[in-house]
Amino acid sequence: MTTATSIKTKTYAAKSADKPLELFEIERREPRAGEVLIEILFCGVCHSDIHQARNEWHNTVYPCVPGHEIVGKVTKVGADVTRFKEGDIAAVGCLVDSCRTCSACAEDLEQHCEEGPTFTYNGEDRTTKENTCGGYSQRIVVDEHFVLKVPKNLDLAATAPLLCAGITTYSPIRRFNVTVGQKVGIVGLGGLGHMGVKFAAAMGAHVAVFSRSRSKEADAKRLGAKEVVISTDDAEMQKHAGTFDFILDTVAADHDVNIYLNLLKRGGNMCLVGAPENPLNVAAFSLIFQRHNLAGSLIGGIKETQEMLDFCGEKNIVCDIELITIDQINEAYERVLKSDVKYRFVIDMKSLQ
Ligand code: NAP
Ligand code: ZN
Ligand code: ZN
């Protein structure tokens, strides 16, 4: 029942690691003074949702309502909200709160908040200590600091995955100064990978996609890649030895990173964003002989996420999506695991009314 302080909300949740997602009802609070209530229109399906729903990172609290690629419409604002009003289109990514005062928060790196950021789902609400519930739901309540504005020219469904797949690839591409004339590799052509290709190409780089088969070659080129390298073909890989300025690894499963490190130029950078369950094996020789750098990157802060959305607005960049209804979510998970998605599933949340 809806009370003065809570709003009954339908969601799709995993109740345990080995069960399919199913309809589940939660209560959202009425927005507090600095918060906005957003009716969710679209929510992207990130591979992290699958890792989390299936407890592959060993920290899932059940029931788990995934979803952190959210676009919706503001339907109510708290008394102190200044940046949004009822009727505005708004977006929410992987973060819904942080301490706002530590050195990371002061540098607009809320994802690295020293007290621990509050993730959109499977996080601990800083006030109530309850488990946070994500975007596979009718609505969400978020502090306006963590709510993004969507450029008016962008398609809303195809914008949703920018909130995770977009910022997660944009941030390292900026941090490692990908620019005109560089040779950049993107490992894995999935949700993150296809956005990595678009962003690196938009920065003017010569982009090569590393994929396990030729089946995605035409798509990779359409997305902006100049070439596709089959990562399972040693001879083909060897042709690129010592030539890459930067490689972004988006692979979600166990794999050998040394074969990519060996393709970097002297002093080249490789950045991991994919988050497989098991630790990787890194050979010292893959790093020391040509003083290669191996780094990681976690989503992006709120300021940079807005910068990414504005950049997408200017360049007319959105994600390539397949729109699904919420009852197709379990089938969609199986297809993501088979790399059978072009290139991000987005749930049309009308289907949860
Ligand atoms: P995705 O759509 O499933 O894409 C992953 C791609 O990796 C696949 O399309 C596939 O590309 C490749 N791949 C899959 N299994 C592989 C294997 N066994 N060996 C080699 N390549 C393989 O997933 P996503 O949503 O892009 O997410 C990718 C990873 O990033 C996940 O682990 C996710 O949790 C993580 N992530 C991290 C952050 C962060 O902040 N760091 C944010 C979001 C997501 P090909 O078919 O082309 O080979
Ligand atoms: Zn994600
Ligand atoms: Zn902080």
Image (tube, rainbow, N blue to C red):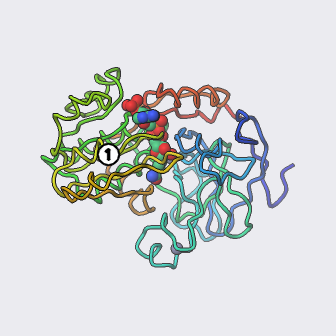
Q: Quadrant of residue 289?
A: bottom left
Looking at the rendered structure, the number of numbered marks drawn on it comes to 1
**Residue drawn at 63 percent across, 60 percent down:** 77
Three-letter amino acid code at disc 1?
A: Asn
In front here: 274 or 83?
274
* Quadrant location, the C terminus: top right
Can residue 179 be seen in this snapshot? yes
Label 1: how many Cα within 10 Å (few below 14, some 14–19, many 20+): some
Instruction: Provide residue 151's location: percent of width, then percent of height.
Output: 40, 48
Q: What residue sits right under mark 1 in the picture?
A: 258
Instruction: Provide residue 37's location: percent of width, then percent of height.
Output: 65, 55
| Residue 106 placement, left or right of 127 | left
In front here: 261 or 72?
261
Instruction: Provide residue 38's location: percent of width, then percent of height.
Output: 62, 51
Mark 1, secondary structure of its residue: helix
Can residue 164 be seen in this snapshot? no
Task: Indicate whether 143 appears above or below 153.
Answer: below
| Residue 264 placement, left or right of 324 | left
Instruction: Provide residue 278's location: percent of width, then percent of height.
Output: 52, 47
